[in-house]
Image (cartoon, rainbow, N blue to C red):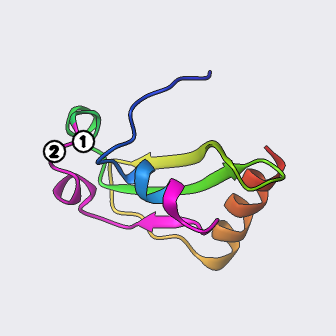
Amino acid sequence: PVFRFDTRGTPCERALASAGEVLVIEQSLCGQFEGCDAISELAPESYCAAPLRDLDGANLGLLFAFDSAPQGIDASAESLLRAAAARA
C-alpha cells in the first residue's frame, strides 16, 4: 500500500537525504528519534532503508524495514536492498 507521512525528524528523512546509500541503524532507533511519534508508537529497535529515485535522481520514496530486535545487515543483504530499490 502507498502511504504518506511527514518525514521530518525521522530515520526516513535521513535515508532520503543520503546519496542513494542504504541507511542502517542496527540498534537504539527509539533513542535516536525520541521526538518522532511514529517511532515511539511502533517502538522498533533497528531500521534499514534505501531511497527510491526516478531516472533524474528525484526522491520517489523509500524501501525500508524495521525490527523490534537489534539487527545488522551484511553486504549481500545491503546489495539486495539496493537492487530492489533500483527496480521499484
Residue 85 in the image: state x and y as whole percent. Answer: 72, 52
Which residues make up the magenta segment? Answer: 16-36
Query: Which residue corresponds to the image point at 40% horizontal and 49% vertical from the top-left?
Result: 67
Residue 81 in the image: state x and y as whole percent. Answer: 68, 59
Describe the element under mark 1 as helix, strand or loop: loop
Instruction: Give the labeled residue for mark 1.
Output: 43
**Which numbered tag is attached to residue 35?**
2
Q: In this image, 69 relative to 87: left or right?
A: left
Closer to us: mark 1 or mark 2?
Answer: 2
27 w.r.t. 56: above or below: below
Q: Nearer the viewer, residue 62 or 48?
A: 62
Query: Which residue corresponds to the image point at 80% horizontal and 54% vertical from the top-left?
Result: 56
Q: In this image, 32 relative to 84: left or right?
A: left
Q: Amino acid at mark 1?
A: Ala
**Disc 1: CA contacts within 10 A as few (<14), some (14-19) or many (>=20):** some
**Which numbered tag is attached to residue 63?**
none
